[in-house]
Image (cartoon, rainbow, N blue to C red):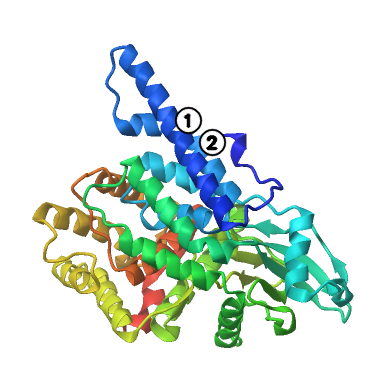
């Protein structure tokens, strides 16, 4: 949108009262703009809709910039809503929130040092021969630094922003108030379950010791898999606020757009195969499909897996329901797809006939690659555009307010993210080979 969204160094507001005051100022500023623009419109003889007044360029910039500055749960909630509910909220709001998926601003050096001292002690530098204060990356909850220990370990150190964990609950309440104020959510859409799940997930993601255990779990599960690299955990330097792991070289996976076709096909096939393993074999999934979580090693041909804060377990019953859905899709059996969709929770007995038809049409569209006989070419298929248009049409329907169960949303989020990556890489995947082992 504008330069206002570019990453820069900025202090994280860490006190709960400070963050509440920032939200109050943000809400007041937006309402002030609404009143001003509304009075101008009425003076010129127009009767604008509330959404027009709320989504002015000035308000869009103010909202996105302030959530990015606050980081923590405020920014993470914007990211989650833009992905989880992106098909169901107004396209204008989804576009605004989508900017929050870019890099966050970074902490000033003094604030970074305060976190390191609180976790490692005032003499923390005794552990390191080098610690780069300029982060490799920054996100909603923390930023990553490269360091070398005195015993020769090359590490990536993820440092959580101060005050993030303590402010999660109040941040979410304030984001919910802003959303309700906007009037941009469909009338029947109940976001309470999504907000509660976001609260639970954020508290989990803010526990870096929990993420360290998930990192270890995936390291063991994929130890003999030649296609993947999982950084090793370094528990002696890991705390609730700091995660220490191997620094592993690699290039961003989305940079492979100009790589040989064989490389793009192989990387995409491996990632889709891993998704199926996570669901049907491990029943443990890294559910954040952000492209930044995948890197590629040109010298080894291996894929580096990063960021296990959003790791989620799935029970056997849900895996079996999705197995039934995939089998129905392969057989192009709309009746079986509908039964599986009801069983999973995409549809309910209260879903109106027209809405059921539209959702089933979109599901059949999304499942098209599974029934392809040979190679499915994500690069030439118009499927992504058709799905986007269908989702936007549903999202613009004020009477549509159903959201699937939370576990299903997270799984759908991962599938959708990999679908977008496959399209970006213009990959070709032999779907029958990919599905054969899991569908029997």
Q: Earlier in the sequence, mark 1 or mark 2?
A: 2
* Residue furthest left as drawn: 353
Image height check: is 50 above or below 24? above
Nearest to the observer: residue 440 or residue 17: 17
Q: Nearer the viewer, residue 289 or 275?
A: 289
Between the residue at mark 1 and the residue at mark 2, the CA separation in whole angstroms equals: 9 Å
Q: Are marks 1 and 2 in contact (CB under 8 Å)?
A: yes
Residue tagged by mark 1? 57
Residue located at (35% from left, 62% from top): 194
Q: Which residue is mark 2?
A: 1
Whole-percent x, y for residue 195 in the image: 38, 61
Q: Give how far across and how far down residue 339 sits, in percent.
A: 16, 72
Quarter in which the N terminus is drawn: top right
Could you say which disc has been placed on residue 22 in the image? none
Dividing the picture into quadrants, the one containing residue 84 is bottom left
From the viewer's side, name the closer residue of 386 and 299: 386
Q: Residues within 10 Å of mark 2 (few under 14, many from 20)?
A: few
Q: Is residue 28 among what the camera can see?
A: yes
């Amino acid at each position: 949108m504008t330069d206002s969204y570019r990453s820069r160094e900025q202090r994280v507001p860490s006190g709960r009262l400070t963050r509440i005051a920032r939200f109050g100022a943000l809400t007041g500023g937006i309402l002030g703009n609404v009143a001003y623009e509304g009075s101008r419109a009425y003076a010129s003889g127009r009767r604008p809709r509330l959404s027009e007044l709320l989504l002015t360029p000035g308000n869009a910039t103010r909202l996105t910039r302030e959530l990015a500055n606050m980081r923590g749960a405020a920014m993470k909630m914007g990211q989650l809503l833009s992905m989880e509910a992106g098909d169901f909220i107004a396209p204008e709001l989804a576009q605004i929130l989508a900017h929050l998926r870019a890099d966050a601003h970074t902490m000033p050096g003094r604030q970074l040092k305060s976190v390191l001292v609180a976790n490692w002690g005032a003499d923390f530098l005794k552990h390191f021969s080098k610690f780069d204060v300029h982060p490799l990356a920054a996100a909603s909850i923390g930023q990553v630094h490269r360091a070398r220990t005195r015993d020769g370990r090359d590490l990536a150190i993820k440092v959580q922003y101060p005050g993030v964990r303590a402010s999660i609950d109040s941040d979410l309440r304030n984001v919910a108030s802003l959303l309700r104020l906007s009037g941009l959510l469909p009338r029947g859409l109940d976001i309470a379950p999504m907000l509660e799940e976001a609260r639970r997930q954020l508290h989990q993601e803010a526990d870096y010791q929990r993420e360290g255990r998930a990192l270890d779990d995936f390291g063991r599960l994929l130890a003999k898999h030649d296609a993947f690299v999982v950084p090793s955990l370094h528990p002696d330097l890991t705390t609730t606020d700091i995660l220490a792991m191997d620094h592993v070289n690699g290039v961003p996976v989305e940079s492979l757009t100009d790589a040989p076709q064989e490389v793009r096909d192989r990387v995409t096939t491996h990632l889709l195969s891993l998704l199926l393993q996570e669901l049907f074999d491990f029943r443990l999934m890294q559910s954040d499909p952000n492209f930044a979580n995948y890197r590629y090693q040109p010298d080894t041909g291996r894929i580096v897996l990063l960021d296990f804060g959003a790791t989620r377990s799935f029970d056997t019953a849900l895996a079996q329901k999705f197995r039934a859905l995939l089998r129905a899709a392969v057989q192009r059996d709309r009746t079986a797809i509908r039964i599986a969709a009801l069983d999973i929770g995409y549809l309910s007995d209260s879903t109106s006939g027209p809405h059921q038809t539209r959702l089933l049409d979109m599901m059949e569209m999304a499942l098209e690659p599974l029934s392809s006989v040979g190679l499915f070419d994500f690069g030439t298929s118009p499927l992504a555009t058709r799905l986007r248009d269908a989702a936007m049409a549903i999202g613009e329907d004020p009477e549509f307010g159903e959201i699937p169960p939370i576990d299903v949303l997270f799984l759908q989020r991962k599938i959708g993210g990999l679908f977008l990556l496959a399209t970006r890489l213009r990959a070709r995947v032999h779907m029958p080979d990919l599905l054969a082992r899991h569908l029997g």
